[in-house]
Image (spheres, rainbow, N blue to C red):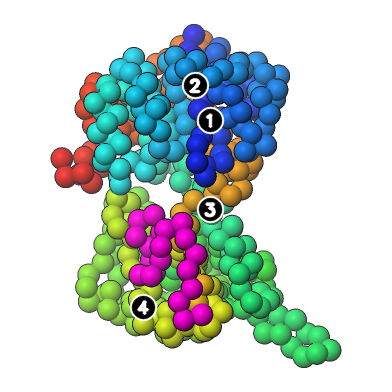
Amino acid sequence: MTTIGVLNETGVERRVAITPEIAGQLVKMGAVVIVEDNAGFNAHHANSEYEEKGAKIGNLNEVMQAQVVIGVGQPTDNVLAMLNKEQVFIANLNALANKETATKLAERGVTVFSLDIIPRTTRAQAMDVLSSMATIAGYKAVLVAAGHLPKFFPMFMTAAGTVTPAKVLVLGAGVAGLQAIATARRLGAVVEAFDVRAAAKEEVLSLGAKFVDVEGAADDKSAGGYAVEQSEEFKKRQEAVVQEHAAKADVVICTAQIPGRKAPVLLRSATVTQMKPGAVVIDMAASTGGNCVLTQNNQTIYQNGVCIIGDSNLAASLPTDASKMFAKNVHNFLKLIITKEGALNLNYNDDIVAGTCLCRDGQIVNERARNAYGL
């Protein structure tokens, strides 16, 4: 019988890795679920909800006795020090960019599964936390922008005259970008979107937005749907086109990222200088350097009357639904490593289990992570 410990997140993180509903399903699978006291509080789930589903409430020491320990993001130093080689740790570790954390976990001998490196295959879609959280972040980015923009999003015909709709430019048309496009369109904005991936054009157009095309982009089909590094020649053409469209925009939503690499710079200082006073930039790539060169992570700054908001953790600002989606992704992954009888079974012949494993037997074993770390 597998014991599963659920951590209470710290700091600004408001999500919980396992909701009461999923805790109940894990109990039905034969697992013992121990939830750290008030772990669900910020996601609006009381301890009593977990207990009603058959889970136990415990302190951190009790949670850390579990065979499988689950968190949302980076483990605290306290949690890291308590993990041991007999345990499995599951979280969204941003593995390709966090060599230090991976190294420490490997040194502890812990078996680690980092949910952000789940293979991007059809079979793994139900476990894809990056897509789930990007959906929430793209939606919230537009709402944050609307809250800071000193004008309406939709067009209004009034007795006092016509109010023109806001113009929104979305940089990066992945999951977050597409959700931002859809949300901005629902609010009545005129939307344009840019992406280096040719495959994104059809999706952008289907949502009623205009696709900003820059010829000559490198598009690697083996990159699993992610953008890849571009040539310097392309970057110069890209910069000129983006600057032209950003100068006319009321809102720019930045979502472009390359796994394991610094975010591509798409908005230069000169571009921001040309933007309208009162314009808003939401930079969701802030934690990896930002698409805007002026972005400061987790801060809101003003430059020449332009509001620049750096926030890579927008999903945490909708903790109830974000936790629901995250927990469902985790549950689907757990079904691969916990048998119907409730026993732990780490089958590394399964491509998803193997591809998500970051560390085991004291080593960093994931090839994508090893390449990113230069190992």
Mark 2 vs mark 1, CA separation in Å = 8 Å
Disc 2 and disc 3 in contact, CB within 8 angstroms: no
User: How many numbered badges does the structure rendering display?
Assistant: 4
**Residue matched to label 2:** 60
**Residue matched to label 3:** 314
| Residues packed near mark 2 inside 10 Å, few (<14), some (14 to 19) or many (20 plus) | some
| Magenta span of residues | 284-305
The amino acid type of the residue labelled 2 equals Leu
**Residue matched to label 4:** 269
Tell us which disc is closer to us: 2 or 3. Answer: 2
| Residues packed near mark 1 inside 10 Å, few (<14), some (14 to 19) or many (20 plus) | many
| Prevailing SS of the magenta stretch | loop
Mark 2 vs mark 4, CA separation in Å = 46 Å
| Residue 357 location, quadrant | top left
Q: What element does badge 4 sit on?
A: helix
Vertical comparison of 131 with 141: above or below: above
Residue at the spot x=24%, y=33% of the render?
A: 103
Disc 2 and disc 4 in contact, CB within 8 angstroms: no
The amino acid type of the residue labelled 3 equals Leu
Vertical comparison of 16 with 181: above or below: above
Residue at the spot x=49%, y=21% of the render?
A: 60
Q: What element does badge 2 sit on?
A: helix
Horizontal side of 199 relative to 371 (left or right) equals right
Sequence-earlier tag: 2 or 3: 2
The amino acid type of the residue labelled 1 equals Asn
Mark 4 vs mark 3, CA separation in Å = 24 Å
Sequence-earlier tag: 3 or 1: 1
